[in-house]
Image: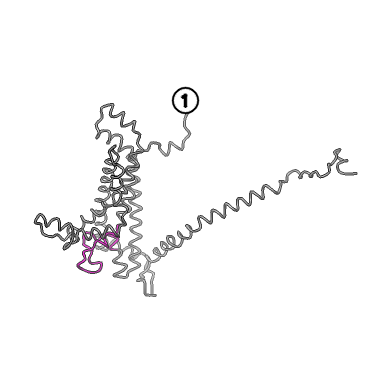
């Protein structure tokens, strides 16, 4: 007797026997597994180059520099010796290192506020409803597109003591040529060179200004508020996240100022000694330790100290920004469940 007869059913010719209970069909899970595998391979194919570049160009150099900071390596001699924390102790006892760090702090304190204020001022100007507004925005942003090396070379030619355009203009008024690339004027030339790229700050501030609802300013004008009152009580509070971002990134960039100093040297002497004392910032002191003194271990320790200073300053800025930065949606409140009417 067949199984169909025992169960009281008749098996139709060509019908598939149902799978036993508790077992899944082999087709759909296999397709799902193949789809998941393809997605995984696509993920690794796209992220693999970045991961490889990060490991070889970021993680390994950082680890190697950290190891060098604990040695007396000169980059050439195989007799590298482990010296522990001696390099870090020397950082805080070396007068030249402390002076260069102080000059970098002064440079940062001058350039960051000037850059933010100048960029915001230009953004407010080009945000007005005037003719050829797009042309003015383009012209003001163009200097930021120029590579830093090209901008520094241009400034070097402009402020050259013998054939520069700046002294040529002063000659028209009977003023003798000034050595702009030497002390005490070299610091101000560097500050002007830093402000040359203020177009980046202007674009970011302009984007923040255009994100502010116009209804707020219109309501303020109806209430009789002046432009300054509207700017200080509406624009600045709503623009505070953008300004905070510019402060953090500006401080990080200013503490690492490097390329403009090398290219804006006084061409009369040779070597790194040509850097004017007022512009002998921390990164130039690091380069001097690398290339002139061949103290790779000590220079690596200097870079790691600078990294820790940047982390500490950034953390301090984040702490001080509490209560000064206005967000339209608070991050803590955005995560909570909104209440309905009646507190339900």
Q: Position of residue 249 (x, y in %)?
A: 34, 50
Residue at the spot 73% in from the left edge and 46% down from the top edge: 23
Rendered position, 74 above or below 337: below
In the figure, residue 236 lies in which quadrant?
top left
* Residue ranking furthest to the left: 174
The stretch drawn in magenta includes residue 267 = yes
Q: Position of residue 16 (x, y in %)?
A: 79, 44
Quadrant location of the N terminus in the rendered image:
top right
Tell me where the magenta segment starts and ends, as one range: 257-285
Question: Crowding near pointer 1: few (<14 within 10 Å), some, many (20+)?
Answer: few
* Residue ranking furthest to the front: 132
Q: Position of residue 100 (x, y in %)?
A: 25, 60
Rendered position, 2 above or below 161: above
Which is nearer the eye, 297 or 46? 46
Residue at the spot 26% in from the left edge and 60% down from the top edge: 153
Colour mode? one colour
Number of numbered discs visible in the structure rendering: 1
The stretch drawn in magenta includes residue 41 = no
Q: Position of residue 149 (x, y in %)?
A: 30, 60
In the figure, residue 61 lies in which quadrant?
bottom left
In the figure, residue 188 lies in which quadrant?
bottom left
* Residue ranking furthest to the right: 1
Q: Is residue 50 left or right of residue 76?
A: right
Residue at the spot 77% in from the left edge and 43% down from the top edge: 18
Residue underneath mark 1: 341
Under circle 1, the secondary element is: loop
* Residue ranking furthest to the top: 342
């Amino acid at each position: 007797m067949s199984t169909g007869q025992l169960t009281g059913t008749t098996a139709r010719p060509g019908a598939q026997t149902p799978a036993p209970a508790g077992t899944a069909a082999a087709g759909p899970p296999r397709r799902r597994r193949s789809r998941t595998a393809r997605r995984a391979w696509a993920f690794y194919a796209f992220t693999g180059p970045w991961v490889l570049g990060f490991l070889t160009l970021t993680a390994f150099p950082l680890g190697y520099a950290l190891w060098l900071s604990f040695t007396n390596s000169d980059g050439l001699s195989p007799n590298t010796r482990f010296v522990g924390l001696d390099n870090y102790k020397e950082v805080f006892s070396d007068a030249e290192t402390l002076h260069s760090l102080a000059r970098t702090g002064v440079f940062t304190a001058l350039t960051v506020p000037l850059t933010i204020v100048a960029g915001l001022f230009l953004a407010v100007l080009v945000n007005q409803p005037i003719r050829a507004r797009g042309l003015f925005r383009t012209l003001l942003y163009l200097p930021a597109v120029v590579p830093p090396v090209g901008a520094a070379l241009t400034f070097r030619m402009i402020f050259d003591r013998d054939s520069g355009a700046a002294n040529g203009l002063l000659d028209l008024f009977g003023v003798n040529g000034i050595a702009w690339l030497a002390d005490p004027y070299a610091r101000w030339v560097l500050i002007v060179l830093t402000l040359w790229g203020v177009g980046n700050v202007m674009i970011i501030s302009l984007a923040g200004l255009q994100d502010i609802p116009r209804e707020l300013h219109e309501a303020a004008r109806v209430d009789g508020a002046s432009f300054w009152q509207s700017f200080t009580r509406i624009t600045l509070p709503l623009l505070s996240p953008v300004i905070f971002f510019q402060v953090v990134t500006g401080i990080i960039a200013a503490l690492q100022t490097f390329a403009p100093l090398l290219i804006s040297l006084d061409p009369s002497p040779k070597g790194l000694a040509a850097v004017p004392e007022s512009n002998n910032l921390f990164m130039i002191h690091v380069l001097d330790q690398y290339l002139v003194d061949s103290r790779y271990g000590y220079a690596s320790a200097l870079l790691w100290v600078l990294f820790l200073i940047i982390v500490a300053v950034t953390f301090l800025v984040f702490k001080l920004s509490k209560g000064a930065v206005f967000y339209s949606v608070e991050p803590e409140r955005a995560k909570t469940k909104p209440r309905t009417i009646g507190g339900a």
